[in-house]
Image: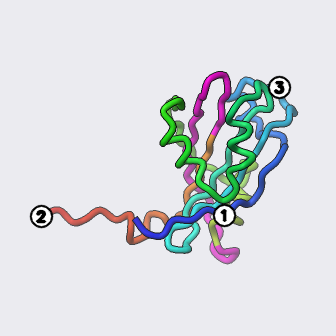
Amino acid sequence: MGNFSVQLLRQGLAVPTADEASAMGLRRGRLVWVREVTLFCDRQPLVFAHSVLPQRPRGPMTGWLKRMGERSLGALLFSHHGFQRSPIEFRRLDRRHRLFQPAVAALASPTNTPMTLWSRRSRFTFGKQNILVTEIFSPELARHPKYHAAPRK
């Protein structure tokens, strides 16, 4: 699969996007915990991840997120049996979406800005807490040699 690494870009309290607030049932303007990272494979940035965790109710996810550092949130979400995942939503983002510019900055070279980026989003529930995870994919992902299917014989 290649050499995988995570770079923490930002973590702390922030206002979620309007569509995130709606998806989480939050009033607009309410502060949430936000974590943004770039995921690398073989030192190439391939995924920008943006996670939103409401401040209330408090629970174990709040502490886990604060201590995560440059470790993969996905490793926790998929290894702990207490998490339940909502259906995955897919969306094409363009420059009008608030996450587009941070994703471009994390994934693309300034001279090669794409017009749109594909994203997927799902909510993970652990007890009474919910975290909304949005992953935005680099156009380079489709060209990365590790992700090409082997030819059929």
Q: Which comes before the other along the chain, label 2 or label 3? A: 3
Q: Position of residue 23 (x, y in %)?
A: 67, 29
Q: Position of residue 51 (x, y in %)?
A: 68, 44
Local secondary structure at mark 1: strand
Q: Which amino acid type corresponds to the residue marked 3 in the rendered image?
A: Arg
**Part of the protein shown in magenta:** 109-132
Residue under label 2: 153
Bin the neighbour count of mark 1 within 10 Å (Cα to Cα): few under 14, some 14-19, many 20 and up: some
Residue drawn where x is 55% and y is 72% of the image: 44
Marks 2 and 3 close (CB-CB < 8 Å): no
Q: Quadrant of the C terminus?
A: bottom left
Marks 1 and 3 close (CB-CB < 8 Å): no
Q: Which amino acid type corresponds to the residue marked 1 in the rendered image?
A: Gln
What is the C-alpha distance between the residues marked 2 and 3? 55 Å
Q: Which comes before the other along the chain, label 2 or label 1? A: 1
Local secondary structure at mark 2: loop
Residue drawn where x is 63% and y is 66% of the image: 107
Residue under label 1: 7
The dot on residue 27 is 3
Q: Which amino acid type corresponds to the residue marked 2 in the rendered image?
A: Lys
